[in-house]
Image: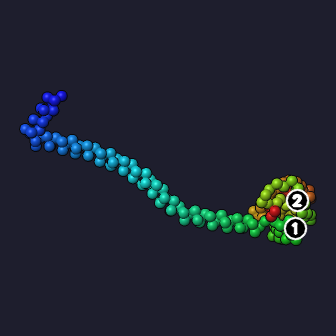
């Protein structure tokens, strides 16, 4: 081992420039390898941050759309709330049906607000049931039924029965049970 060290020392004294270049090459190679690894790690971190930035930019562009959709949902919710039936306000509730009668020219000889079911478990709304009889021509009765379905009040037909009242004419009668959505 001493001989090897002595030979290296002699070689370094004889060729100092070559030894310095070799040591410098090894140090620079190690530094280049270290910098390459750091560059690779930084590129990976940059890709992650760039993807997050692109996601944020897309969210920012969508934010105006989301705000607009939220405003539309609020307007629709407000419209639904305005058209809910108040069970105790019998006059306004029946007036709704009489306005439809006037628009469609069908007749409502029977119209009754039935008491609400006691087993209604909905926390937000109350089901307000009605029983009615609609008479008139087929077109008038169909127009009133269409007006009920497409009108501002939210309702559900629970049962119906349609029959001709005049076998020779075009008069029909529609017995209808429905529930309108009301405030709790």
For marks 1 and 2 on the same chain, the one whose residue lies earlier in the sequence: 1
- Residue 102: give x, y in percent of width and height: 84, 71
Relative to 7, 76 lies left or right: right
Mark carried by residue 117 = none
The residue at which mark 2 appears reads as 116
Residue 116, picture quadrant: bottom right
Question: Which residue sits at x=85%, y=61%?
Answer: 128
* Nearer the observer, 39 or 63: 39
* Nearer the observer, 85 or 12: 12
For disc 2, the neighbor class at 10 Å (few under 14, some 14 to 19, many from 20) is some
Q: Are marks 1 and 2 in contact (CB under 8 Å)?
A: no
Question: Which residue sits at x=18%, y=28%?
Answer: 1
Mark carried by residue 88 = 1
Relative to 148, 6 lies left or right: left
Question: Which residue sits at x=81%, y=70%?
Answer: 103
Colour mode? rainbow
Determine the CA span between mark 1 and mark 2.
11 Å
**Mark 1: which secondary structure?**
loop
* Nearer the observer, 7 or 28: 7
- Residue 90: give x, y in percent of width and height: 88, 68
* Nearer the observer, 119 or 27: 27
Question: Which residue sits at x=62%, y=64%?
Answer: 70
């Amino acid at each position: 081992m001493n001989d090897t060290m002595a030979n290296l020392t002699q070689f370094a004294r004889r060729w100092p420039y070559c030894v310095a270049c070799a040591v410098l090459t090894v140090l620079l190679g190690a530094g280049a390898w270290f910098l390459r690894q750091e560059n690779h790690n930084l590129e990976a971190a940059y890709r992650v941050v760039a993807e997050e930035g692109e996601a944020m930019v897309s969210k920012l562009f969508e934010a105006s759309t989301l705000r607009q959709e939220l405003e539309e949902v609020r307007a629709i919710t407000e419209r639904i709330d305005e058209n809910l039936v108040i069970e105790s306000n019998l006059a306004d509730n029946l007036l709704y049906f009489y306005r439809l009668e006037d628009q469609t020219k069908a007749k409502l000889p029977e119209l009754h607000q039935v008491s609400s079911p006691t087993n209604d478990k909905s926390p937000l709304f109350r089901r307000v049931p009605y029983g009615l009889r609609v008479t008139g021509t087929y077109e008038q009765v169909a127009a009133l039924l269409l007006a009920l379905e497409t009108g501002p009040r939210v309702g559900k037909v629970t049962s119906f029965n349609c029959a001709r009242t005049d076998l020779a004419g075009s008069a029909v009668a529609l017995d209808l049970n429905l529930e309108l959505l009301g405030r709790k």
